[in-house]
Amino acid sequence: MTMRLFIARDAGAVAVGADDVALAFEQAAARRGIEIEIVRTGSRGLYWLEPLVEVATPQGRVAFGPVTPTDAPFLLEAIISDGPHPLRLGITEEIPWLRRQTRLTFARCGVIDPRSVDDYRAHGGYKGLERALTLGADAILADVTTSGLRGRGGAGFPTGIKWRTVALASGTRKYIVCNADEGDSGTFADRMIMEGDPFVVIEGMTIAGVAVGASKGYIYIRSEYPHAVQAMNTAISAAKGAGYLGAGIGGSSHSFDLEVRVGAGAYVCGEETSLLESLEGRRGIVRAKPPLPAHQGLFGKPTVINNVLSFAAIPFILAGGAKAYADFGMGRSRGTMPIQLAGNIRYGGLFETAFGITLGELVDDIGGGTLTGRAVRAVQVGGPLGAYFPRALFDTPFDYEAFAARDGLIGHGGIVVFDDSVDMAKQARFAMEFCAVESCGKCTPCRIGSTRGVETIDKIRRGERVAENIAVVEDLCNTMKFGSLCALGGFTPYPVMSALKHFKDDFGPATHLQAAE
Amino acid sequence: MTAPYEPWDATRGAEIIAEHTGLEGATLVILHALQETFGHVPEPAIPMVASALNLSRAEVYGVFTFYHDFRKRPAGRHVLKLCRAEACQAAGGEVLAARAEARLGVALGDTTADQRVTLEPIYCLGLCATAPSAMLDGRVVGRLDEARIDALVAEAQR
């Protein structure tokens, strides 16, 4: 019988050698004269174990990792003889880090072949669309509302309300736009799902099209993600071939077409109105709201614009899971969140779980603390626009409102861990600098405020009139927060102010780093 | 090594532009396609794009200069991008970036005098759980340490 192996083609796995490992297994099998089939999947998201190699057994898939190319021949022998091997991790699904998760959105990621519609269907794919087609628009919208799903890009706006607004908008031409401009450092869930289970994104967007009466969708993917671009394009072709995109989707009277568009390195295009400008072929300059994209979005037409993870949550919800989805979570944060553990962390990766888990559990318990083994000093939650939290706030539950109450945000669910060698004044400076470089330039608080912010923090770090200059930074942050047109200028104060508030000792002549080393 | 690029040719440029003019909001698509062929967006192409899309030169030039990706002149034979965003900063990326700069004798954003290597910062490759990370001519590399960054630099210099 042919031995079936599973090795990720996910960029994160490839970056640590998954392609070389796959090649080594092919060569080892050829030398040994046995037949193997290597399925290139997405990643399971346990990145410290990548490259992870799984083998199909009657008991389920058994995992080994992290594997190097030189391990391949020995590992192959161990698999054939069902013998012990130092890298053997047991049944994949039983690995505690994976078993502790609630994978609704990421259920298939790392399991299926991301190029195969058949494999997707064999694992429950397209059940949501099939049911949606029998339900009709009103019932689809009711299900999305019932699920309590809120926009996973960071803003947390209720998806059901957004979709209903577009459904009610007049006009025969409407658009579905997927925001795959995942520019926040520490986040990679969009990339993972596009590479590991692209059909779930396609299915979610198609359901949105049916719900609001749109027949054209765009996926705007950042150019830094060439693997995701390729995976989505391949999946779109496969879905077209199988009758799930194009005219008469799934045998219905609905038509829906999808196209991938590639960004060009502008962080601000992750902001929805800037993204729409970019899709229209212009500079990514933010639009004032209103009008909302739901009324006048792409090319001035009513547009559903959602994050990748929002669309990817939809198929589960429409496959009869609306109530089950809403049963997870806390407060007004319903369902699960694919949380990304990153930076200086021992067990980094994708951890999907119900809202409500605390920051401390995520960092210390699940993440295992720092990779360097030093003490965790700060974590940045929610990307470059998210606040830095000290250990004292590790009891904060992962929930939109709980983070907001502590002057933070969960954003797109990324958590970046820093050890005690971090200089927080430097991180605050970086936040201002990043904003200055990436500002679209339309509004003054963002464009000028960030540049003045860099200069003023430099003065503080040089020890020039520290107290007065800290007051200037606070004033600048206040202006940016309330005077900026979008979240770039409006949220840059979060990392800056949180660094000032929780790590004030770092602001002054730069002595901290030397002291730590 | 990056794909060998074609020298600028107006007829070839016009063909590339014509392939995409039917698309909605085609400007970025066309600029990407031109850069893939010629290694940069040649200046004579800007008025051609404008004319094909019924836009002003200023509008097309404005788009071209807004986005970090589009190049005015070709990069070096190899492009080494080092992630400089927070997750890679937390994992020691700054020291490695300084090391690469020292080895190549150029600062981030510059090309070596022999035109072999362009060293660039990039703000997040989405490889934040295997940080620090880099991309050499489209190939991603994670878990960088001194030995790996040295090997990448050496590979780029070949």
Image: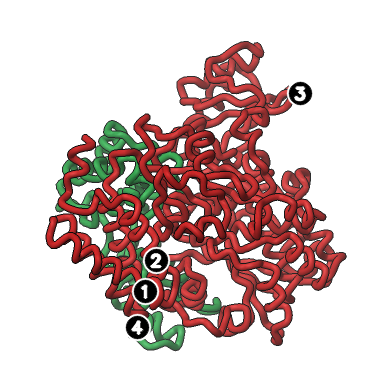
Q: Position of residue A410 (x, y in %)?
A: 51, 56
Q: Colour of chain B?
A: green
**Nearer mark to the viewer, of 2 and 4:** 2
**Nearer mark to the viewer, of 3 and 1:** 1
Q: Which residue is mark 3?
A: A58
The mark nearer the N terminus, 3 or 2, is 3
Q: Which residue is mark 1?
A: A440
Chain letter for the residue marked with disc 1 in the picture: A
Q: Image quadrant of residue A303? A: bottom right
Identified by mark 2, the residue type is Ala
Image quarter in which the N terminus of chain A is found: top right
**Cβ–Cβ under 8 Å for marks 1 and 2:** yes
Q: Colour of chain A?
A: red
Whether discs 3 and 1 lie on one chain: the answer is yes
Helix, strand or loop at disc 4? helix
Q: Image quadrant of residue A373? A: top left
Tell me the crowding category of disc 1: few under 14, some 14 to 19, or many 20 or more residues within 10 angstroms, Cα based. many
Tell me the crowding category of disc 2: few under 14, some 14 to 19, or many 20 or more residues within 10 angstroms, Cα based. many
